[in-house]
Amino acid sequence: NSAQIGVTGLAVMGRNLARNFARNGYTVALHNRTVARTNALVEEFGHEGDFIAAETAKEFVAALERPRRLVIMVKAGDPTDAVIQEFAPLLEPGDMIIDGGNAHFADTRRRERELREQGIHFVGMGVSGGEEGALNGPSIMPGGPKESYDSLGPMLEKISAKAKDGAPCVTHVGPDGAGHFVKMVHNGIEYADMQLIGEAYQLLRDVAGYSPAQIAEIFRTWNTGRLDSYLIEITAEVLSHVDATTGQPFVDVVVDQAEQKGTGRWTVQIALDLGVPVSGIAEAVFARSLSGHAALREASRGLAGPKASPLSESEAAAFADRVEQALYASKIVSYTQGFHEIAAAREEYDWDIDLGAVSAIWRGGCIIRAAFLDRIRSAYDTRADLPSLLSDETFAQEIADAQDDWREVIVAATRQGVPTPGFAAALAYYDALRAERLPAALTQGQRDFFGAHTYRRTDRDGSFHTLWGGDRSEVDA
Ligand code: NDP
């Protein structure tokens, strides 16, 4: 009796993924550094399917049918390397190590390269959906060698989430680190989505004067329309929750300092390296950082702000509709930026990534799942080489319809002193992209002035330099 798959690392994610495989009829070998976790899983959930508990790495590997499929679900970083070093010597060519942790894609590229020399297939696999998703169906983003997907793919398709049309939320994303890269950008987009929702909430509260319970109702209504998504749905749940000990809205008793684990920050760091403007995601990461600077915020509390002018009841209702438009338009922009980053990495690393397929596997199971992703997929179905989501006719039209309200909301936020870095960055990106001329021409002039960095001309080819310190004549550079 041997296992089709093994899972090592049985904390919340690994445990639930193992149970998901077992519930789908696979025999699952189990291993964890601390044996107590393995035993606890078998005791509590052993009845759910066929498990083979292993105490040692050797027993674990011996329990797997060949070629072996070994899923690692441990803390990302050094622990992942430690576990690979423990298991790799026990494996044979053709075996597969699948890393389901939140690895940095550059680590995944390195590990894939090293293991390839040994003939081991290394699959960096992004998993989204938290512990709930791991158990009932996550969105899965495997990279690694394409041939690994032949035997692994059908199993992943079984345990993955299914989109509304029944399609499994998993595809072979691309070679080596492509899966983890796409998972990282997914998380970056998730940060941006959450930031935009947060800004909408604060505007509804501080400009429109609604209570958390009223705002929850507004989000519930929005969730029946084009903003229909998991994050909007849970936002309504969180906002309507009342704290049991104080009777206050739950959101008012939580310390307003947002934490982060790092994938949002990576998305921005790599975007800087690739030269891709992901300003919406960057603002979301910065907003979390700013919230955490408690002493700085305390010291700044006395700074002057504008005079508040509350809206009337009818004005507030109209304003809420405008905020919906601003949120939707900004959301289109953050997805545009995120997909641009994936497209740039595809080019840089020579990955064969189908952007439409990526949006399709995010339709179920993951944190950013939303009706909206169907629209993105059809945009890429219509035109696979779309230069940007904003070039899609439908999205362009929707933004055209939303833009007046979007601008009004940012004006109101500015007047009332409510920070909306996400909305404003998205609008600035949109306006910059559509601008006929950008002040970058002036930047080039300045660079040529102080550093002889040269410039190109609009009317003829070549590089030029002006003799700024001399007679200001122009020379070929
Ligand atoms: P943790 O990230 O908390 O990791 C705990 C697990 O790692 C335990 O099984 C632990 O073993 C093992 N471990 C830690 N260090 C070592 C080591 N040096 N050698 C061997 N094993 C080690 O668990 P999670 O379940 O939260 O996450 C697992 C992975 O999934 C992480 O990479 C995470 O980023 C990723 N992920 C998490 C999501 C979530 O919502 N939590 C969502 C998507 C991905 P022991 O029991 O012996 O301590």
Image (cartoon, rainbow, N blue to C red):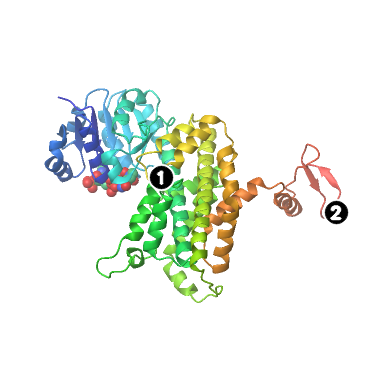
Whether residue 275 is visible, yes or no, is no
Mark 1: few, some, or many residues within 10 Å (few <14, many ≥20)? many
Coordinates of residue 225 in the picture (x, y in percent): 44, 47
Q: Quadrant of the C terminus?
A: top right
Mark 2 CB lies closer than 8 A to ligand 1: no
Most foreground residue, 61 or 234: 234
Instruction: Judge left or right: residue 240 versus residue 5.
Output: right
Q: Which secondary structure lies at badge 1?
A: loop
The residue positioned farthest toward the front in the image shown:
314
Relative height, residue 253 to residue 112 (above, below): below
Residue located 59% across and 36% down the image:
387
Going by the numbered disc 1, the residue's amino acid type is Ile
Relative height, residue 191 to residue 48 (above, below): below
Contact, mark 2 vs mark 1 (Cβ under 8 Å): no
View quadrant of ligand 1: top left
Coordinates of residue 161 in the picture (x, y in percent): 32, 36
Q: Quadrant of the N terminus?
A: top left
Residue located 54% across and 35% down the image:
348
Query: CA–CA distance between discs 2 and 1?
Result: 58 Å
Going by the numbered disc 2, the residue's amino acid type is Gly
Q: Which mark is residue 223?
A: none
Coordinates of residue 159 in the picture (x, y in percent): 28, 33
Most foreground residue, 143 or 82: 143
**What residue does disc 2 label?**
470
Instruction: Judge left or right: residue 70 versus residue 178.
Output: left
**What residue does disc 1 label?**
368
